[in-house]
Image: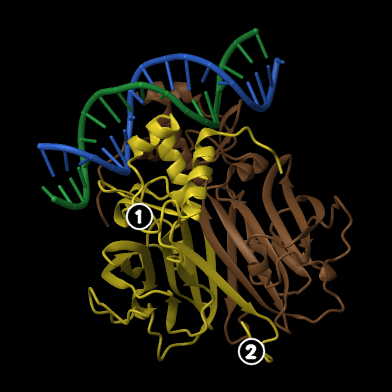
Chain colours: A yellow, B brown, C blue, D green
Amino acid sequence: MIRPVPSRRHAIADDLRHQISTGHFKAGERLPSEAQLATRYTVSTPTLRSALALLQSEGLVEKVHGSGNFVRRPLHRITYLGGVAEPATWATFSSPLRVTTRTTNIEAHSHLPTLLNVPPRSPLTEVLRITHEGKMPHSLACIYAPRDLAPADSPTATPSPEQIEVSSADHRPPLAEVQERLSARLPTQEEAATLRISTSLAVLSLTRVATDATGRVVEAALLVLPGDRTDALFITRLNAEERTPNA
Amino acid sequence: MIRPVPSRRHAIADDLRHQISTGHFKAGERLPSEAQLATRYTVSTPTLRSALALLQSEGLVEKVHGSGNFVRRPLHRITYLGGVAEPATWATFSSPLRVTTRTTNIEAHSHLPTLLNVPPRSPLTEVLRITHEGKMPHSLACIYAPRDLAPADSPTATPSPEQIEVSSADHRPPLAEVQERLSARLPTQEEAATLRISTSLAVLSLTRVATDATGRVVEAALLVLPGDRTDALFITRLNAEERTPNA
DNA sequence: GAGTGGTCTAGACCACGAG
DNA sequence: TCGTGGTCTAGACCACTCA
């Protein structure tokens, strides 16, 4: 490992992190205002804010515009469970969530023909899905499916809070393969505004393509998960015929 | 989707993105200096730099300290393949890479006992692994294993460039389960210095825990993958008895 | 309306890379 | 050495939240 020159923002982040872990700042508590903290550490506000951005990306601090910076309650992270077990269940989050859905009929354009392996301008159903935790938006999903495969979804539905169904693929060929591609990036301005997160907070970007046994792409989903409050978990079991009982 | 107030940095990023995609700036080419671009867009340097940070996190632009900003050659992303198929193969990257390894004997401390499910201060082997692509560092891995399970690794080895072996588990109980937890966050200062990336470039942080058939944790690995040049790909095949031949 | 965070400016100074 | 990007300052102004 390379020993870097200590930078102010990391030094401040280290100090605040220590104060949070020792309980000097307690969970749920509001931190002093950024102006006060900047004075205390004798740095300018942009520098202090970049220190807070580090803690935010670790999920230790939550910023609320107009109200303050708060110490995150621990274990508040939400887990996206990848590698589906049941075709009907798309993704399981470990927390109860409220879901808003908007369904639109569109034609394949830009990157969608490639992604879904369909001709350009072929009919698709687009489902825009925003999940809320409490009153804060939490994650964003854009799901595309060929129109003839699209499930009859009630507009603005509020399905079971425990599990989020995306495609209720009942009487169709079973899913054969699911590809999930993840990357870390900064949000677009739209994404940041919709999720009400800072534009400097990294997001986990997940592209999921499900293919049925005939090789046809059944559904493609683009998920955006804020990095401060979301993990993605993939569990692979080998030698599936003998499953060890312990976790 | 919420329509945000257009911010200067996103407007500039959109414009540059467009100029790159239309070939006005070609792959491998150097962009004008940040000072020149700031003048052209009539913004201050921090604002222009934050616009470049967006493009960097998308993998479109590469910053080289002291030398300039360059248009990334496309498809230069490296893919981490999750969900192992072979117990001996830990992770496969799609590009030839050079690997530097340093092995240390340590005792379990801080978060390691929990992660590996061993008592505190129990003997572990730590392997620090830095992969290079060309002369630039590319990814960082910290691998921990109980000492009695640790493979006899030659110090500073340069194994097969195509595949990176981590545990050559030959005559031991087979792996039963692999858990891979991913999150997006900003790098620590150490990570940024070691990988020679900007501290504002998001990284994909991956924690991988492998358990053998007896439930014992065989190995835990902490990977840090720069967000601008790395994807993680997980492929789940359902109904494994009949595998569709096409991709 | 008072106080908070979000964005942006117009510089300064340092660290790095190439000639 | 010179031009580059990296970090930081000390403000300004706007948007949001809450009383």
Question: Judging from the image, what secondary structure is the residue with disc 2 in?
Answer: loop
Label 1 neighbourhood size at 10 Å, few (<14), some (14-19), many (20+)?
A: some
| Image position, residue B153 (x, y; %) | 87, 60
Q: Is residue B235 left or right of residue A158?
A: right
Q: Which residue is mark 2?
A: A245
User: Closer to the camera, B184 or A167?
Assistant: B184
Task: Check the picture and name the quadrant holding the C terminus of chain B.
Answer: bottom right
Identify the mark at residue A29; answer none if there is no mark: 1
Whether residue B19 is visible, yes or no, is no
Disc 2: host chain: A
Q: Is residue B232 above or below residue A14?
A: below
Question: Judging from the image, what secondary structure is the residue with disc 1 in?
Answer: loop
Label 2 neighbourhood size at 10 Å, few (<14), some (14-19), many (20+)?
A: few
Q: Is residue A52 above or below residue A175?
A: above
The residue that appears at 42% across and 68% down in the rendered structure is A221
| Image position, residue B68 (x, y; %) | 57, 28
The residue that appears at 25% across and 46% down in the rendered structure is A66
Q: Name the kind of residue labelled 1 in the image.
A: Glu
Whether residue B59 is visible, yes or no, is yes
Residue at mark 1 to residue at mark 2: CA–CA distance: 40 Å
The residue that appears at 39% across and 23% down in the rendered structure is B40
Task: Check the picture and name the quadrant holding the N terminus of chain B.
Answer: bottom left
The residue that appears at 39% across and 21% down in the rendered structure is B39
Q: Name the kind of residue labelled 2 in the image.
A: Pro
User: Closer to the camera, B13 or B104?
Assistant: B104
Disc 1: host chain: A
| Image position, residue A86 (x, y; %) | 48, 85
